[in-house]
């Protein structure tokens, strides 16, 4: 019976670690989409490294600081987290998360909607009991750009209606409200 209890404790500890890592990933997506630098920074260890394609490679804290102003100026942005694979090695976890990213980019000829599929390849480390990102490398798998054409489901939704909640990049967003 003692061996079974040890196995169960190990499984429970791994389950809790998985949940903590998944919560960090969800917090990251929310932090980026809401342009919330404080929330985004809470996902990384202070000495973490961010490698974000051809746009940035260096300390995560500098990446976050530089990204905040750009994110606030961008149109709608949404990160959708898909499946996540986690391999544990003691206090290190190798994490691969599939991600779909929608972004609206302003351009001289009009807005462009871009949909990108990729993977967040992370090394999480548990330090002082907390699982956070120590190093991230973004992998891009595909991309589709198209001219923006927003008709709100062929007119089904009316963004002028007071009951229509349009996403925001500040603490006035519905996700920060408690109702």
Image (cartoon, helix red, strand yellow):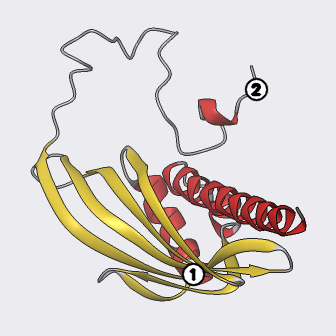
Residue at the spot 19% in from the left edge and 46% down from the top edge:
111
Residue of label 1: 60
Residue of label 2: 178
Q: Please give left or right for residue 179 compared with residue 111 in the image.
A: right
Tag 2 secondary structure: loop
Quadrant placement of the C terminus = top right
Density class for disc 2 (Cα within 10 Å; few <14, some 14-19, many ≥20) is few
Asked if residue 163 is positioned above or below residue 129 in the image, the reply reads: above
Q: Please give left or right for residue 98 compared with residue 13 in the image.
A: left
- Residue 157, percent from left and from top: 33, 12
Q: Earlier in the sequence, mark 1 or mark 2?
A: 1
Quarter of the view holding residue 151: top left
Tag 1 secondary structure: helix
Quarter of the view holding residue 120: bottom left
Density class for disc 1 (Cα within 10 Å; few <14, some 14-19, many ≥20) is many
Mark 1 in CB contact with mark 2 (< 8 angstroms): no
Per the model, the C-alpha gap separating discs 1 and 2 is 30 Å
Residue at the spot 90% in from the left edge and 67% down from the top edge:
2
Q: Please give left or right for residue 142 compared with residue 30 in the image.
A: left
Taking depth in this image into account, of 113 and 1 the one nearest to the observer is: 1
Q: Please give left or right for residue 14 compared with residue 40 in the image.
A: right
Residue at the spot 67% in from the left edge and 55% down from the top edge:
19
Taking depth in this image into account, of 52 and 132 the one nearest to the observer is: 132
Quadrant placement of the N terminus = bottom right
Taking depth in this image into account, of 125 and 17 the one nearest to the observer is: 17
- Residue 106, percent from left and from top: 24, 52
């Amino acid at each position: 019976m003692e061996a079974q209890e040890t196995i169960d404790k190990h499984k429970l500890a791994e389950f809790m670690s998985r949940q903590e890592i998944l919560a960090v990933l969800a917090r990251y997506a929310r932090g980026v989409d809401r342009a919330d630098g404080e929330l985004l920074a809470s996902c990384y260890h202070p000495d973490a490294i961010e490698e974000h394609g051809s746009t940035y490679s260096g300390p995560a804290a500098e990446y976050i600081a530089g990204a905040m102003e750009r994110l606030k100026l961008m149109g709608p942005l949404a990160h959708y987290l898909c499946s996540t694979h986690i391999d544990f090695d003691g206090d290190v976890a190798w994490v691969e998360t599939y991600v779909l990213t929608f972004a609206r980019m302003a351009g001289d000829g009009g807005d462009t909607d871009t949909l990108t599929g990729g993977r967040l390849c992370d090394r999480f480390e548990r330090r002082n009991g907390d699982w956070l990102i120590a190093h991230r490398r973004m992998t891009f798998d595909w991309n589709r750009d198209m001219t923006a054409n927003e008709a709100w489901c062929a007119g089904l939704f009316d963004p002028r209606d007071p009951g229509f909640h349009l996403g925001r990049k500040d603490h006035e967003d519905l996700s920060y409200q408690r109702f």
